Image (cartoon, grey):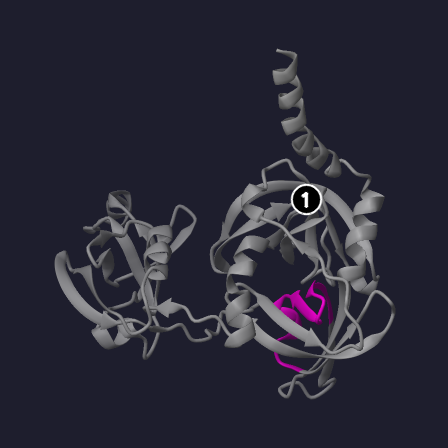
Amino acid sequence: MRLWLALVALLAAPAAAAAELCTEPLTVVFERVSPSVVAIQAMKINKARPQPRFETVVGSGVIIDKDGQILTNAHVVDGAASLSVTLDSGNRVTARILGLDPVMDLALLRVDTAGALPAARLGDSSGVRVGDEVVAIGNPLGLDQTMTRGIVSALNRLLPGISDEPMIQTDAPINPGNSGGPLVDRCGNVVGINTLISEDAQSIGFAVPVSAAKAVLRDLREVGRVIRPWLGMQGRAVDNRLGAVVRMPVTPGYLVEVVYDGSPADRAGVRGGNLSVAVQGEEYLLGGDILTQINGTPIRSHQDYVARVKTLRVGQRVKIVVVRDGTPRELSLTVSERPRLPSDLSD
């Protein structure tokens, strides 16, 4: 019996030790992670503005490889005429963009230095829970190496019109200049890339989950972009309740409000909306087709649509079912690569 208890205690020891690492003082977490956090200065030229045409955007980034690879936000570096990075040592070096993803708002940079750089440890955001304590490290308002503290206040937060990718919500104070910096757990692992704040609320910020970021790193390194399937439709879910309000027959499904010119949906003859109607504070663009199926899979919500499109391949031929004027129609289209859209990286 004593031998069995000793064995249990021995097996539990590594787990207990690992748990203790996550209770280290915040000073230790900062000392461990801050050497890998950098300040980014992007000089951009606005040709449409007479004066001043030059604008300097400041942000943050995190070194993810000792060879000088840095992860940051795409909106910080997009369109930059020149890029520089200030390391924790105070040295300022020139940077170049390896890859940029405007959909997830991520960019991968590279700096060339004589020696190896301190790299942060990328964690697994799938294990993050609401209530977990986190810190944001970056350069808010140009004040370098600043750490703020908070908790994870929500998970899988979808922001219609901003991003279809689920994000981590935190109340750790995030300010202009924090963009691209790491959201770190108490173990010193990067669990997110701080991306945006809500100007209409207090203590609500959002970060790209690091697991989602890691999933696109290879494409950013090797291709310079992330290749995504695209049908070229944008809309929202509808059900029979909407039909009762607008006094017209409505089939449950995905109301197509916008069809992008030249997209697969446009070439297949899918129709978008043309009549703007506000229903209980929600604006609908009626008159378009209602998408009900993609390759036999029912589509009932925006989440259904996004999830199904992600499973498709560029060049794949797919069949969709739309309802137009109460009549189902089957259309065939060829999936294309998602282009950069005007709404990408918008304010």
Residue range in magenta is: 58-80
Residue nearest the observer in this picture, 116 or 47: 116
Residue nearest the observer in this picture, 233 or 93: 93
Q: Position of residue 54 (x, y in %)?
A: 73, 84
| Residue occupying image coordinates x 36% and y 55% | 307
Q: Mark 1 points at which residue?
A: 171
**Would residue 198 be seen by someone viewing this image from the given angle?**
no
Q: Position of residue 185 (x, y in %)?
A: 69, 45
Dot 1: element: loop
Is residue 71 highlighted in magenta? yes
Left or right for 274, reference 227: left
Quadrant of the drawing holding the N terminus: top right
Is residue 169 highlighted in magenta? no
Task: Classify residue 86 by image quadrant.
Answer: bottom right
Q: Position of residue 68 (x, y in %)?
A: 71, 71
Left or right for 86, reference 304: right
Task: Classify residue 320 by image quadrant.
Answer: bottom left
Q: Where is residue 230 in the image (x, y as percent from the top left)?
A: 35, 69
Quadrant of the drawing holding the C terminus: bottom right
| Residue occupying image coordinates x 81% and y 42% | 26
**Would residue 61 be seen by someone viewing this image from the given angle?**
yes
